Structure formats: C-alpha cells, structure tokens
Image (cartoon, grey):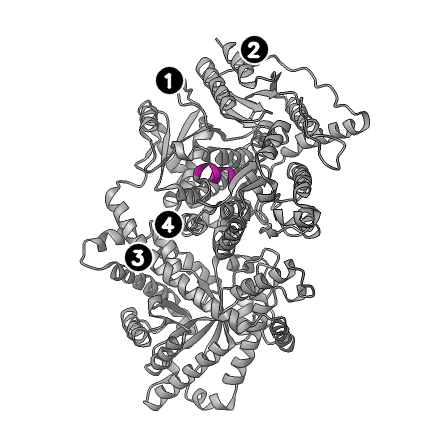
Amino acid sequence: MANSIQKLQSLGQSVWYDNMRRGLITSGELQRLIDLGVSGLTSNPMIFEKAIAGSNDYDEALLELAGSDASTEEIYEALVIEDIRAAADLLRPVFDRTGGADGFASLEVSPHLAHDADGTINAARRLFAALDRPNVMIKVPGTPEGVTAVRQLIGEGINVNVTLIFSLDAYRQVREAYLAGLDELARSGGDVSKVSSVASFFVSRVDTAVDDLLEGRLRSGTGGLEGLLGRAAVANAKVAYRDFQETFYSDEFAALSSKGGRVQRPLWASTGTKNPEYSDVLYVESLAGKDTVNTMPEATLTAFLDHGRAAEAISTEVSEAESALRRLDEVGIGLEQVTTKLLGDGLRAFADSYDKLLANIQEKLGRLQAQGHKHSGVSLGDHEPEVEATLSDLQDGDVVARIWRGDHTVWKPDPTEIVDRLGWLTVAETMCERVEDLTAFGQAVRDEGTRSAVVLGMGGSSLGPEVLRQSFGSAPGYPELIVLDTTVPRWVRDVTQSIDPTHTVFLVSSKSGGTIEPNVLYKHFRAVVEDAVGREAAGRHFIAVSDPDTSLADLAGREGFRRAFKNTPDLGGRYSVLSYFGMVPAALMGLDIATLLDRADCMREGCASCVAAHDNPGAWLGAAMATLALKGRDKLTLVTSPAIGSFGLWVEQLIAESTGKEGKAIVPVAGEPLLLPDAYGDDRSFVYLRLGGDDNAETDASVEELRSSGHPVIRLDLRDRYDIGAEFYRWEFATAVAGSLLQINPFDQPNVQAAKDVAESLMEEYGRSGDLPAPGETSSWQELVSKATPGSYMAIMAYVQPDADTDSALQALRRGVSERYGIATTLGYGPRFLHSTGQLHKGGPGTGLFLQLTIGHPNDVPIPGEAYTFGVLADAQAQGDLDALRTAGRRVAQVELDSDVPASIARLTAELV
C-alpha cells in the first residue's frame, strides 16, 4: 500500500527533505527516506551550523583540513561540497528515472551575497562546477540582485533554487527571470531540457507574522478578526500557485516547453507548523498539487507519514484565498509590508547563521585539537563493557531512529501517553521561531518599570524557571524572577509582602490549566493586585502559559490577562523547559534566549536519528544511567559546579517522575553534601556537571577521589552557563532512552494522582466538618532510621519554607544520615515534590525511607472565594501524601516541627549520634 508521500507523488507533488548533514548519508537514513519516496533535499547554513557544532559528523574531516592552509570559509565549503555530492549521488536514480525532472540536492551561496548580483553569479558558477553533478541546484535568494543572478545563471544552464520568496510580487519577478534566462539559453543554442529551477515560497512564517499582528489587535479589543487567524500563509500560497498556472500553463510558455523547457515548480518551504493550535501537517495537506515541491523538516515529514492525508488542495478555494488577503488589507495588515520584513529577517537570520557556522568551525577545531578521546571524562570501571554492550543493543534495535519516528514500541505496546508526548524532541527548533517575539515581550515588560515577575506553577512549570533564576539571575534593568510553587502560608505571605503589586507581573503556568496550586495562588494575587490597581487594570499584571483550550487559557481571555502563551500540547510538564514554560520566564529575566535555544538545538543535532548510539550524547548517557541502575548502582548522584547547583533540582524531577514506576527506578540524588569515597555504598554512580570558569577546585578534588576509589563517574563539561540549554536537551533524551532500557513509559505518571485523590477527599471532609481528619500513626524518627539497610535511601519531605538557615539544617541532617547509615538522601520541599519525586516515592522500588516534616500555621493566609485557607490546603496535601505512601507500603515517619524550624531539624540530626 502506498504511503502518504507516494500518494503526494501521484498528485504530481515531490517531497524533499529540508535537512542535510553527513550522518544522514553515512547512517543510511537518507537512503531510507528515498526508499519511502523522498525525491530531493535542501540545505542551508543554519542546518549545517547545528550539525557541525552539535555532532561529531565532521570531527575527523575538520582535523584533516585544519592541517592545510585553507580559510575557515574554504573548510566549510569543502565539507558541504562533499556532502551535497554524496546526497546527489544517492538521489541520482530518482533523477534518471524522472528524466531529470526530480532528484535534486541544493547548496546555497554565501548569504552575504544576497545584494551582490555579480558575486552571486560567480559563487554559483564556482559551486556548480565544484559539485560536478547534473542533479544539484544552487540556492540564490529572491532579492532584486538575486533575481538578476537567476536570469544569468539559468541562461548559462545552471540549475537554481530561488529561495526566501515571501511576496507575490517577488515571485512574479522570479518567474520572469526564469523565463528570460530560459529564452536566452535557447537562443544561444543551449539545451533547455537540461536546466531546472524551483521557486521556494516560504509559508509558515507568513502566518506567524500575520497572526502576531492580528492577536495584537484582538488583545487591544478589536473584534471580528478571529476568522483570519491561520489563513494568510495558505491564501498567499494558493494565489501564488494560480499565478504559476497562468504563467506555465499558457501559450506563452508553450514555445519553450516544445523545446524541452521545464516549468519552474513552486517549492513550499518553511512548512513546519509553528502554532500548536494548528495541525502539524497544515502546510502539507493544504498545499498538495501538481507540479509543486514540498520541502519538509524532519518533524513534519514524520507527522505526515504517520497521519497525513494526500488530496488535491492547492488549486481549490482560490477565490476564498483572495478574499482573505483583501480582508487583511482592509483591516490595515498589508501583506506586502509583512513579507518585506520577513525577507529582511530571513536574510539576517541566514547571514547570522553563516557567521556563527564559521565561528563554530573555529571553536570546534580548538576543542578537537585540545581534547583526547570523547569519553575521557568517564570512568565506569568494571561496568564499561556492560555499557558498551547496551549501546550495541540500542544500535542493533535502531532505538534512536525509532524514537525520532515516534515509535511507541520503543517503550510500550500501548501508544497511550507516548505518541502525544514527543514534542520535546523538536520544541527548541520551534521556539527559535519565537525568539524575536519573546525578546520584545520581555523588553516591553521591563520598559514599563516592572520590578518583579512571579512564576505561579508546579513541577515542570516551576523547576525549569527556578534553575534559570538561580543560574543566571536577571539581566540589568529586568525584573527579579520569583518562583512560587507552594501552598505553605508563610512562604506565600513572605512573597506577597516582598513585592510591590503595582510593579509586578505574575506568570500563571499550568499545562492542564487545572492544577490546584497555581489556581489558588492566582486567586490570592489577583485580589492583591485588584486592591492595588483596581479591577479593570489588574488583568495586565497576569500572563498565562498553558496548552490550547484549557480552563487557564479561557480564564486568561475572560479576565483580561496581558498575554496567553499557548504551548504545544504534545509534551509533558517535565519535558517542557525549552518551551514557553521555560522561555517566557527567561524572556522576563532578559536572558539571551536565542543562545540558550541554539545550544539546545546543537545538542538536538548530536542526538539525531542518524547518529550512532555510541556517538550520541543523549543515548550514551541514557545507556550508562540505565545499565548502572540495572547493575545495582541505581542512586544517580548529581554533582555540579557551584554556580549551576540548582540544575540538579530539574534533573531530579525529570528522572524521578520518568523512571520511578512499576517498582523500578533510577533514584536521582541532587544537592547532597559531598562525602569521602568510603562513605558511599556500591549502589552509587556519579555525574559531575562542571562549568568552565567556575570555582571548581574543591569539587574537582572530591570527584577525583571518587573516581580513583572506583566509583563510576561521568563528567559533563559546560563551556558557560548557556550550555544549560544543551544539558536540558541531553538529559531529556537520556531519560527517554533509559526508560526504554528499563522497559517503562517515561512520559506518564501513574502514581502522582494517588496523593492528589487523598488530599481532595480530605478537603471534602473539611468542607463538611470544618476540620481535617486526624492523621494516622507513623513510625518515630528513630524507628525510621533504624530500618536503613544497604541499598535504601531516605527521602526528606519538608512542608516548610526554604531559607538559608533551614537549607543548612537540612543539609546537616542529610550528611548525618549518610555518614551514620551509608545511604543516599534526597530532599524535596512540599508540595513542590508531589509533582516530581512524588511519583518515584509511590511507584518506584520499596527501598525508600520517608521522613515528612511539617509545621503549624499560626499566621494562615485565606484564599479568596474558597472556604479553606492555604494552611488547610498544605496540611491536606501533606496528609494525603502520607496516606498514599502508607497505602503503597512505604516506611514513613512524620515529625511536626516547632516555630524554630532550623533548631527542630538540628535536634533530629543530634539524635543520629
């Protein structure tokens, strides 16, 4: 049965792959795609930049070329010419089978030549000759100077892909240049049947730009524009295709056609959907038609193969498309102005990527020449052969490529909560398209004199922003970021008293929109803001981040929020840090979001489907984590440089909630005091995230002692803080791979609901009686620690407000437990941890000892519109957690601390002696 790509071919449309790197060729991935029906390939400096910086595809070639006198630009050209030649050779059977109509690979001239016609012509001649293949195209931008070059190049018989076309007028000029060049070739005695061209008409970026303008109007109160959202790009393309038909299906073209002249096919570019509310195959299904090409990025191609529908669409409803464009013009959104800006933005983006590419080549060369073996920071001891065997199994099972294809059987036979949870694979690439908007948003909030930005979220919605807050801090002039993920009244009260509500924005973050903590925190702060600025003005102090069509998204519209950022729904909270959930707080802090996402995107290239498991940084780490855990070293202990110490908080929730289920787990241990090597049992493995330039001497020495003593140690080097973006991605991929090896679903959280259900029932009882039921009996503190055995761990669950003295006291308690009993310790503040390590506590192995610390609430905080207070809610959550742990058969102790929290904790530590 024909697949969806082959069905498009039957309609007369070719599918090209918008991606190029050496690994696609060496791994056999490009040949696999060709076998599926892909019949061409496009490339650009942005793609090569990520591949060179983020993978080892080019490492050997770079080192070889480094010994020559070649410039950096010559090194780049040598690399890509070899790649494009190889791709063209793989596509040559398609070219031959179609009589030269298809099977092309494209290479771009330097983006810095966009406004230099002569320079473009000379570069195109040189590259075409160097490639020396009939089925290659030279990419030339659709600027006025580029159009001049197109006419000359076509007249010389050089195949051209005219790129960065956004407007109908520019497309008209491109068609005219092609026809003129073809005519000149014919007049000079050339064979017009030997030259081909496509006109790359960019699509999704038009919707992004126009929708932003429309949504701005809607936010300002202008109605009647909703029906235009998501219409501009397809309408623009449909009218362009009508113009194509009028040109190339006309009597005027018949003379050239009779000599073998080919139509210049429209190529639909930028077809990855950027808006999560639109179909992920919108720009494929809507643009299917004869004599066209659709060049798709990996995610779009995978989605279309999975659920795309091929039917003639591009030539239908053209009058409706024209009407939509007229309506946009009537409301003051002129498409010509929009597309002019898009062309300028596109040229700058490509030029910036080209410059970054050259800089990355230099930087990569420096690193390659300075370092030894890629895993020189790893010491696995006796476990190294086992990890190598696991990597071989991953490779033999094609696991990495299957992850990228969305194959749920990598984890489970049932696709539930898997196939709709893989958006994290490509979300960084998607968010790169939103950098300009996010940056402008952060600047606008800053320019209004905002002093504080408070994140109201839980779990994945709060821990990523907390890492960014602690690791970077806010840029000068930007508001201080405060992350509030608690129901503990003292904490809520202290944040309330620390801010000026007239100069504060609140970011309400919830994937589902129904999470109780951010919802009640919103009610509290909405009342605070209304008291300060009045009901009418209060809404502009609130921002929402949620999935589309949630109660929170609806609330944002009803109550006049300043902005609602709607996230892609196909990723879970703990895999969401590189989406709006992490990037909106980053924008409010004034961080360089482009660099943060760029680092993540480079790591994505390193983890790509075409990278062998041993060379894949995410797969390698996942294999090591899982193999060590299955061999009994299941306490993955995270050690960090001081400046990025909070990174462990995020990794902890990612691994704990992803792997702690079905009685299995990798137990992440974050923020634990470092001890002497003999204080650790043989259930430990260590990962050291080392930040270059930080004060690492003491940590380096401790980690070296661990390595020398035989403990498995993995060192991951970060060049600077922005490499946290890469680490976010590496650990997500590693955790997904580890889940496969543990044979669990890393994307669900089957036991998290248990504590929520108990807390809800307790709240219902409170509503009936005015009191919470008395908690049941638990072990005493001393009884609990007496149950410590090799391989167990202690989870300290503190329903208190964190501060320096409390943190210090809890760290002393952790140290005391580890030194006295030789077991690992974890620490979570409640109710934050219920959305992260809480899953591990109930669903993982029964090796945990659980100490719950609570306090009274002498100065409780009411919740507007609710019969209960924050204190009642916090107590119900603590008791619900305790009951859920007991139901799961866990060993628990509950200790209520007095008002001097650090002193109370110190007394527990003293009892260990």
What's the CA distance linking mark 4 and mark 3? 14 Å
x, y percent for residue 155: 35, 83
Local crowd at mark 2 within 10 Å, few (<14), some, or many (≥20)? few
The Cα–Cα distance between marks 2 and 3, rounded to whole angstroms, is 62 Å
Q: Quadrant of the N terminus?
A: bottom right
Segment colored magenta: 465-471
Compute the Cα span from label 2 to label 1. Answer: 24 Å
- Disc ID at residue 782: 2
Q: Position of residue 902 (x, y in %)?
A: 53, 18
Q: SS for tag 2?
A: helix
Task: Determine the main secondary structure of the stretch shown in magenta.
Answer: helix
Position of residue 172 relative to residue 483, above or below, is below
Residue 678 is labelled as 1
Residue 533 makes an appearance in the image:
yes
Disc 4 target residue:
54
Image position of 766 with respect to 101: above or below: above
Q: Earlier in the sequence, mark 4 or mark 3?
A: 4
